[in-house]
C-alpha cells in the first residue's frame, strides 16, 4: 500500500555533513551558501551541491508560514485515530482537508496522528464528528494545545500588522521557496530588492511570518521520529524549559487532555530515540510517558493563508 509519493534518490546522511547543514539551516533558513559553508566548515561548492540535492529530493523544504493566530486559527489540536482496518480512508480524507496541517502513520495504540488548526472549539467538534463518521475509524482521541513551546514552524505571539496584496504575494512565493532571493521576489512583485527586504523584515519582526525548515521522515529521510505524551505532576515547573532546550526535541507543546505535554523527538538511530525519551522521563515532575513511532509523514503543510 502506497500512502504518499516518494521522490527519488537522495538519502540524508543523518550523522554527517548533511545533519550539520540541516542544523545550520534551522538556525538561519535564509542564510547564504557562503554563510552556511562557513558554519559547517565545507567549501561553498560542496554546500551548494548538497543543499540543492536535499531540496530537490524533498528531503527538506524551506518554507514560510503565517502565524495561525493572525489567521484567527486559535484552536490547535492533536488528533489520534485507531482504525478497524487500513488507514488509507482516514489519511486520504485528512490529506485533503485544509484544517489538517500534519498527518502521520504511526505505530502503537493508534494508527495515525494529525494536527488540526481551526477557529473555534465548535469548528473542532464539527471536524471530529466528520472523522468519527468514517467507517474505518474505531477510536479517536484529542488533545488541545494550550501553548506551543517549540517547532520548525512554531509561532509565538505576534504584533498586529496589515497585509496588502504585495505582502500576500511575497508570502505566497516564500511558501514555495523560503530561500527565494530578494532579487527574484522583487522581480515578481515589481519592487526593488531593498523594498522587498524592508517588507520581509517587517513580517518577520512582527512574528506574523516565520520561515523554517521541514524535514522529511520515514522513507525519504534518515531521521527517525517518536511522539511522546507526557504526564506532569508536582515539581514539574521546569519541564517546559527542558522541552524547549533539548536538542532531540523537534516539536513540543503544553496540552489539555490525556497528557499535560506532547513532544516529538528525532534521532538517526533507535538508540538515539531511546536516549531522548529517557532524558524526558528523568525530568523532575514527569510522572509518566507514552510513546509512538512515526512510520511515515503523509502530509506536513503549515502554509495555508486561511
Image: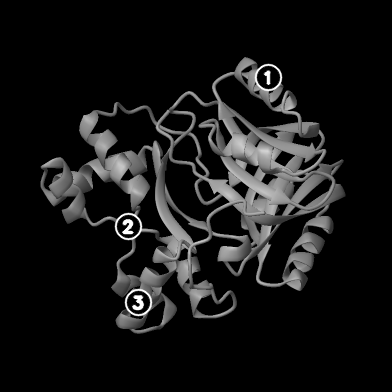
Q: Nearer the viewer, residue 34 or 178?
A: 178
Coordinates of residue 297 in the picture (x, y in percent): 61, 52
Q: Secondary structure at mark 2?
A: loop
Residue at mark 2: 179
Q: CA distance from mark 1 to mark 2?
A: 37 Å
Label ID, residue 49: 3
Please report the residue visible at 74 percent of the width from the left and 42 percent of the height from the top. Answer: 261
For discs 1 and 2, the disc positioned in front in the rendered view = 1
User: Does residue 19 sit above or below 78 in this rendering?
Assistant: below
Residue at the (73%, 70%) spot, across then down: 272
When the figure is inspected, residue 104 is found, relative to residue 76, above or below; the finding is below
For residue 250, which quarter of the picture?
bottom right
For the residues marked 3 and 2, what is the alpha-carbon distance in whole angstroms? Answer: 15 Å
Residue 292: image location, x then y, percent: 78, 52
Give the residue drawn at x 79%, y 66%: 274
Which tag is nearer the camera, tag 3 or tag 2?
3
User: Measured along the vertical axis of the image, is residue 16 above or below residue 286?
Assistant: below
Q: How many marks?
A: 3
- Mark 1 or 3 closer to N-term? 3
Q: Which comes sooner in the sequence, label 1 or label 2? A: 1
Residue 125 shows which numbered tag?
Answer: 1
Indicate the secondary structure of the residue bearing disc 1.
Answer: helix
Cα gap from disc 1 to disc 3, whole angstroms: 47 Å
**In contact (CB < 8 Å): disc 1 and disc 3:** no
Q: Secondary structure at mark 3?
A: helix
The C terminus lies in which quarter of the figure?
top left
Amino acid at each position: 500500500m502506497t500512502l504518499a509519493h516518494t521522490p527519488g534518490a537522495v538519502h540524508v546522511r543523518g550523522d554527517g555533513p548533511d545533519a550539520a547543514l540541516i542544523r545550520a539551516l534551522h538556525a538561519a533558513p535564509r542564510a547564504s551558501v557562503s554563510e552556511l559553508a562557513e558554519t559547517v566548515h565545507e567549501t561553498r561548492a560542496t554546500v551548494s551541491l548538497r543543499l540543492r540535492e536535499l531540496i530537490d529530493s524533498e528531503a527538506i523544504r524551506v518554507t514560510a508560514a503565517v502565524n495561525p493566530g493572525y489567521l484567527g486559527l486559535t484552536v490547535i489540536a492533536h488528533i489520534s485515530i485507531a482504525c478497524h482496518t487500513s488507514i488509507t480512508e482516514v489519511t486520504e480524507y485528512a490529506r485533503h482537508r485544509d484544517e489538517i496541517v500534519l498527518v502521520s502513520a504511526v505505530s502503537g495504540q493508534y494508527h495515525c496522528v494529525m494536527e488540526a488548526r481551526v477557529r473555534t472549539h465548535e469548528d473542532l467538534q464539527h471536524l471530529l464528528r466528520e472523522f468519527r463518521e468514517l467507517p474505518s475509524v474505531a477510536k479517536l482521541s484529542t488533545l488541545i494545545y494550550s501553548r506551543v513551546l517549540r517547532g520548525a514552524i512554531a509561532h509565538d505571539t505576534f504584533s498586529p500588522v496589515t497585509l496588502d496584496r504585495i505582502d500576500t504575494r511575497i508570502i505566497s512565493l516564500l511558501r514555495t521557496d523560503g530561500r527565494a532571493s530578494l532579487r527574484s521576489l522583487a522581480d515578481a512583485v515589481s519592487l526593488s530588492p531593498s523594498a522587498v527586504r524592508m517588507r520581509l523584515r517587517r513580517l518577520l519582526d512582527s512574528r506574523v511570518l516565520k520561515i523554517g525548515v521541514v524535514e522529511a521522515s520515514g522513507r525519504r529521510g534518515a531521521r527517525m521520529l517518536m511522539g511522546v505524551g507526557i504526564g506532569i505532576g508536582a515539581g514539574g515547573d521546569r519541564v517546559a524549559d527542558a522541552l524547549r532546550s533539548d536538542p532531540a526535541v523537534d516539536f513540543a507543546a503544553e496540552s489539555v487532555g490525556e497528557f499535560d505535554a506532547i513532544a516529538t523527538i528525532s534521532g538517526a538511530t533507535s538508540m538515539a530515540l531511546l536516549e531522548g525519551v529517557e532524558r524526558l522521563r528523568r525530568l523532575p515532575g514527569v510522572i509518566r510517558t507514552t510513546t509512538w513511532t512515526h512510520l511515515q509523514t503523509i502530509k506536513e503543510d503549515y502554509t495555508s493563508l486561511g
